[in-house]
Image (cartoon, rainbow, N blue to C red):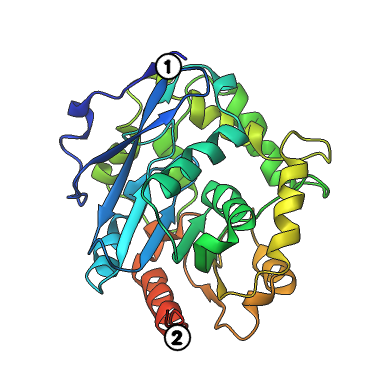
Amino acid sequence: MEFLTTPHSRFADIVDYPFEEHFLKVSDNAGGWLNLHYVDEGPKDGEVVLMLHGEPSWSYLYRHMISPVATKGYRVIAPDLIGFGKSDKPCKQEDYTYQHHMDWIRALLLELKLNNITLVCQDWGGLIGLRLVGEHPDLFARVLAANTMLPTGDHEPPEAFMQWKNFSQQIEIFPVAGIIKGATTTQLSEATLAAYNAPFPDESYKAGARQFPVLVPITPNDPASAANRKAWHVLQTFNKPFITAFSDSDPVTAGGDKLLQKLIPGCLGQQHTVIENGGHFLQEDQPAALTEVLLNFMQANPLAKQ
């Protein structure tokens, strides 16, 4: 598989991202290997918090949450999905499939021997993460879902999503930082916008970012629909602690929190919240509020003694 690696110099001036680099080689499903980058902060024997980003961001999105959580004694793992951040970037859109993304993050969990995981997921972090919970419920101890869902294609997608999908395929220059900027409620600094553009020196690096909207199941016979339905069968019996922390200003995912609360038994009795003044990328808009929700959630739902 042909792929690109973003030059390290592109990340030299990134602000507020002091984390040591870690890389894992994962199969490209074509006989070769790709480098998957991840942040690994906090004590190695601490409870694991897995923070999964979505489209078109990278682990930089969690920069204001990683250290506050790690300093509480938790081990924070925040990968860059293949095609994003410091991870390698296959050159062709068709090299990115829902199943490939699943396999790449599953490889990280298995290689690092992670268990008792608290999942924090937003956007595509949920499409991947929630399905992982459905396929490996034994690996997960808690889930915090923010502005995300696990679609099966059995329901009509919102018009806003269809407009986004069409935009992503038709726009000549895919405006990564502009997309982040347009889906936040706060004004992002030039340094922050530059950090979101950093992984993508030119359009040839953006195949993964362009492909993600195409991979969302919007029809019942989508290639991922059956696997997502199967994951839902498990999620509907998942009784470990599960909390929603959606934001109040994300029209695309609005209402998804109520559906999760209705269908997943682990949601019962949890302190679900709607975070105010937060857009789709609430980790940018309200990182302190989301961090507080996460820490309170974990402390209120301690792991059972082994």
Q: Nearer the viewer, residue 96 or 116?
A: 116
Quick check: can you spot residue 47? yes
Q: Name the residue carrying label 1.
A: 204
238 lies left or right of 26? right
* Residue at the image position 20 percent from the left and 52 percent from the top: 16
- Please, what is the three-letter code of the amino acid marked with disc 1? Ser
Q: Name the residue carrying label 2.
A: 300
Q: Is residue 146 above or below residue 211?
A: below
| CA separation in Å, label 2 and label 1 | 46 Å
Q: Is residue 56 above or below residue 283?
A: above
* Residue at the image position 29 percent from the left and 68 percent from the top: 46
156 lies left or right of 80? right
Badge 1 element? helix
252 lies left or right of 153? left
Dot 2 and dot 1 residues touching (CB under 8 Å): no
Q: Earlier in the sequence, mark 2 or mark 1?
A: 1
Few, some or many C-alpha atoms within 10 Å of disc 1 (few <14, some 14-19, many ≥20)?
some
Question: How far across and how far down the image is residue 111, in percent?
Answer: 39, 44
* Residue at the image position 56 percent from the left and 23 percent from the top: 171
Question: How far across and how far down the image is residue 56, in percent?
Answer: 46, 39
